[in-house]
Image: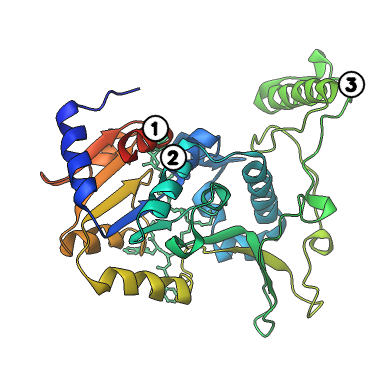
Amino acid sequence: LNKIPTKDRESFTEHLKHSTRILALCGAGLSASSGLPTFRGAGGIWRNHEATSLATPEAFEADPALVWQFYSYRRHMALTANPNPGHFALAELARKRSQFVTLTQNVDGLSQRASHPASQLHLLHGSLFDVRCTEFYCDYSERDNFTDPIVPALAIPKGSSQPLPSIADNTGEEASKSLAAAMQGNKASQEGKELDISDAGIPIPRISPEELPQCPKCQKGLLRPGVVWFGEALPVKTMSAVDKFVEKSDIDLMLVIGTSAMVWPAARYVEEARSRGARVAVINMDKQDGKRNLTKRDWFFHGDAGTILPDILS
Ligand code: BJW
């Protein structure tokens, strides 16, 4: 896409060669070329909802079925996606450099599937494949639940072969949406495909609370995805392991990969590393996001993380 200027590549390669303590902060842009949508910008809308507005305890309380549909869809997307060369390049760097640590805000499991050493990978925002009970007195939690769909009611509907509504019945915006949905449904059905339920024009079934994932321990609470929503604390053990690494000694290099770096406390690690002497390299598809807070000592590599990382880290 964008050719890296030779002098930037040379100075980065030289610095990487002499770096010992390296930190990477990853965001949704790392998984973009694996086909997974980001949170902000055009890809961040799910059925007319801002993805970030569904990632809250309040949204789950108000409409657990909607939030579970969103997460069930994302579990399915993540399970059917593959890690890209960016995930593999980070995993390889971790194997080569014992003092390299990746902090990922991503919950999609792609770094793990690229065999990133687990002891050098910290999941700041949890995982789509962890679940836990929502009852405050119940401590039930499960890791690596890859059942897809997690309950039958959350299966992504296949195209139905209902007859198309007649043109005469279709006037106005709603009607043309339902026609488009029915046409997509019919096409999907002919091809045996799942419907794209991220499109608000595609009808999805109403789900009652009893059909959502239930806690097998207390048999009272609903299960929820084991991710960190806005207003919730990040996992304590993860944070203390990260802080231990960061506070131990100076940091040589900080890689900021495919993130808008707007969400706290994850974003604060960039400044923290800088204050410990790190030079910062930002890899981002968007100039505005990537160049925010850059200093003269930093590098900005403009383009797809899946292409740039294997190039600059090899
Ligand atoms: C590419 C690319 C390609 C595209 N190649 N690049 C003011 C100051 C400080 C803090 C706050 C504040 N006001 C509110 C807060 C707190 C809040 C916060 O930070 N809000 C901000 C929005 C202001 N933070 C919290 O609430 C956190 N908790 C907390 O603070 O707790 C306090 C507490 C303490 C003790 C007890 C109780 C509470 C929790 C934050 C949790 C965030 N959760 C989510 C959802 C996770 C689950 C899920 O996945 O559904 O995490 S929100 C969402 O944002 C998700 C992401 O991990 C996170 C970051 O997004 P990311 O990854 O950067 O994605 P995008 O879309 O923003 O950016 C993608 C980038 O990639 C773009 O730049 C593209 O250009 C680029 N890109 N394609 C390279 N191919």
Nearest the viewer among 114 and 189 is: 114
Question: Total number of numbered labels?
Answer: 3
Point out which mark residue 304 bears.
Answer: 1
Residue 83, image x and y in percent? 54, 41
Quadrant of the rendered image holding ligand 1: bottom left
Report, in whole angstroms, how far the alpha carbon at label 1 lies from the one at label 2.
Answer: 9 Å
Q: Work out whether residue 41 can be spotted.
A: yes
Q: Tell me what residue is drawn at x 42 percent, y 42 percent.
A: 89
Q: Work out whether residue 289 can be spotted.
A: no
Q: Residue extending furthest front?
A: 96
Between tags 1 and 2, which lies in front?
Answer: 2
The relative height of residue 189 versus residue 129 in the rendered view (above or below) is above
Report, in whole angstroms, how far the alpha carbon at label 3 lies from the one at label 2.
Answer: 45 Å
In what element is the residue under mark 2? Answer: helix
Label 2 environment density (alpha carbons within 10 Å; few <14, some 14–19, many ≥20): many
Q: Which residue has dot 3 on it?
A: 163
Q: Residue extending furthest left?
A: 296
34 to the left or right of 69? left
